[in-house]
Amino acid sequence: MTNDSPYTPPAVWTWQAENGGTFANINRPIAGATHDKPLAVGKHPLQLYSLATPNGVKITVMLEELLAQNITGAEYDAWLIQIRDGDQFGSGFVEINPNSKIPALMDYSLSPPLRVFESGNILLYLADKFATLIPKDPAGRTECLSWLFWQMGSAPYLGGGFGHFYAYAPEKLPYPIDRFTMETKRQLDVLDRQLAKHSYVSSDEYSIADIAIWAWYGQLVLGRLYNAAEFLDVQTYSHVMRWAKAIDSRPAVKRGRMVNRVSGAPEFQLHERHDASDFDNKARDKIA
């Protein structure tokens, strides 16, 4: 790919071949399963199929926060979905999420069992199911959901836009990097201004809005996404930094970050989670 000559799109686009870059081998313009593969089912009411991307981390943090409140109905099995291997295109996963994106959840406490997909919806489903981490008054709930949906609408510019062109694209091009850097910094400024007025994003109470936003923007400013903290000058967003560090220190967040993680330091990798004791006994540094 070069910029030697301008690109003129054809009248009708056709899929020619992989377009290069990270994840190119699993990108395709059609939906549906590519192979038969049923999903395993463990012993707990909630069955999570995921990977510790920011969207996956949202749900494992949420589940660990629920368990920290002694909500036993939130016990879960977390099964690893290796997206670079195309596990999300297996028939069992597609039955739960026809969009083939992690995370996906099955609730076997109901009859028939209920599928839940899209990370924001899973957070809202769990918050409503267990009546926690979401305000009960209509005004507070609405504000919380406004910020939850802000994250769902904004993060694609961060991940699919900035993250792709800055870290994953086969060639670094100034126009898309500048375009999505500008938008990412605008979003950080939105958050910084909001957090200047509140301890947490939607109010002074920790909620699912914080869990959703921290998984993306908190980890970004803490230097865990795209190796871009210096490039984005994240230290200038002092209120975001304060909030990100406060959430990062929560024990449930520390546990949630580990689940379904397959990269980084071995002591922070718990490929699957089926029992609370797995954090002490089955992290990669314990079984390597």
Image (cartoon, rainbow, N blue to C red):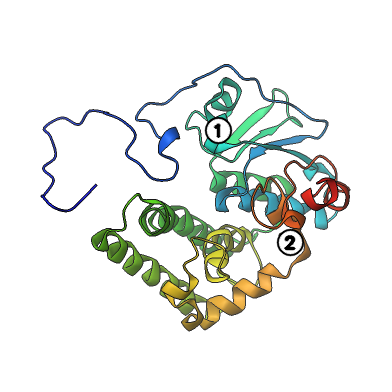
Q: Amino acid at mark 1?
A: Asp
* Secondary structure type for disc 2: helix
112 or 93, nearer to the observer: 93
Q: Is residue 252 above or below residue 7?
A: below
Q: Amino acid at mark 2?
A: Lys
Give the quarter of the image for residue 256: bottom right
Q: Would you name the residue on which mark 1 appears?
A: 85
Whether residue 199 is visible to the viewer of this picture, yes or no, is: no
Q: Is residue 38 above or below residue 276?
A: above
Q: Which mark is residue 285?
A: none
Residue at position x 71%, y 48% in the image: 259
Give the quarter of the image for residue 155: bottom left
Q: Is residue 48 above or below residue 36?
A: below
* Secondary structure type for disc 1: helix
Q: Is residue 108 above or below residue 59?
A: above
Residue at position x 53%, y 42% in the image: 118
Q: Is residue 154 left or right of residue 13?
A: right
Tell me residue 217's x, y (percent): 52, 65
Question: How crowded is the residue under tag 2: few (<14 C-alpha within 10 Å), some, or many (20+)?
Answer: some
Q: Would you name the residue on which mark 2 appears?
A: 254
Q: CA distance from mark 2 to mark 1?
A: 27 Å
Tell me residue 97's x, y (percent): 54, 31
